[in-house]
Image (cartoon, helix red, strand yellow):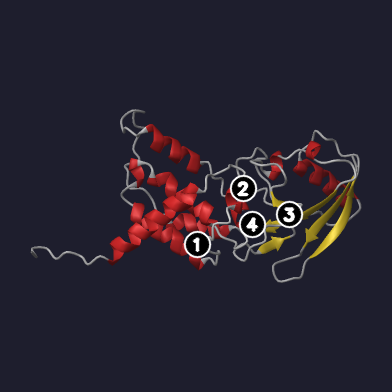
Amino acid sequence: MNLTLKVWRQQGPSTPGRFETYEAKGVSEHISFLEMLDGVNERLLGEGKEPIAFEHDCREGICGTCSMVINGEPHGPVKGTTACQLHMRMFSDGNVITIEPWRARAFPIIKDLVVDRSAFDRIIQKGGFISANAGSAPDGNAVPIPKPDADAAFEAAACIGCGACVAACPNGSAMLFVGAKVSHLGHLPQGQPERDLRALGMVQQADAELFGNCTNHYECGEHCPKEIDVKVIAEMNRDFVRAAIRAEEPKQVAGSG
């Protein structure tokens, strides 16, 4: 198939960007979206032109680095799919495809389709650590965990931190990401000692990174490639409010009545 690509090109965070048009000819329906971009870049290099900068790593829908907005939708038109797992059979001959980077104040553009998502790293760092003794691997049944809690923790842990939730949200909110990280350990006994500090620290850091507030549009859950349930946002809010109240409680003086 033959396609027309309108790709956002930008040399750096302080330079203006623009859309440029490229032709992708003879594209096989069996290749992935990133492989299609690889082909375009090979042609650009052959013509002595600068290739399109975009991120990728595993190309297996695991790492979350293939962050791009395709025809207005983070990761493209297929629900529950990353851009690297999006195949060209989802498009038709003659289609015009618009490709942009994540659009969020907290994700400044580095170049073309590459954005700086280190804000997510700083949020994770604010989550601290768990105080469980790492030691050797414990027996699988040494710490009983109710199956509903184990299932909820596993579902939240599926978050790959790609940032599609931020790109999809009209407010540029990261609450689905933060909620998934808070909820993951919040359901497990190993995560209880630091539960309050984790919720407070991660939410406060998200605010400091200038992510927007959640106003329940739920576009985040709709475009999440791992289909994280938006209930993790409610769980995060519950933990944050509880932790904030406890932080304001006066400390009891030893020996006082």
Q: Is residue 198 visible?
A: no
Residue where numbered disc 1 is placed:
206
Q: Circle 2 — which element?
A: helix
Q: Circle 1 — which element?
A: helix
Q: Badge 3 local density, few (<14 within 10 Å), some, or many (20+)?
A: some
Q: Which mark is residue 167?
A: 4
Residue where numbered disc 2 is placed:
222
Which amino acid, by three-letter code, is at mark 1? Ala
Task: Tell me the quadrant of the picture where the N terminus can be found.
Answer: top right
Task: Give the percent coordinates (x, y) of residue 103.
Answer: 67, 61
Q: Residue at x 80, y 46 (%)?
A: 37
Q: CA distance from mark 4 to mark 1?
A: 15 Å
Q: Nearer the viewer, mark 1 or mark 3?
A: 3
150 left or right of 162 in image: left
Which amino acid, by three-letter code, is at mark 3? Gly
Which amino acid, by three-letter code, is at mark 2? Glu
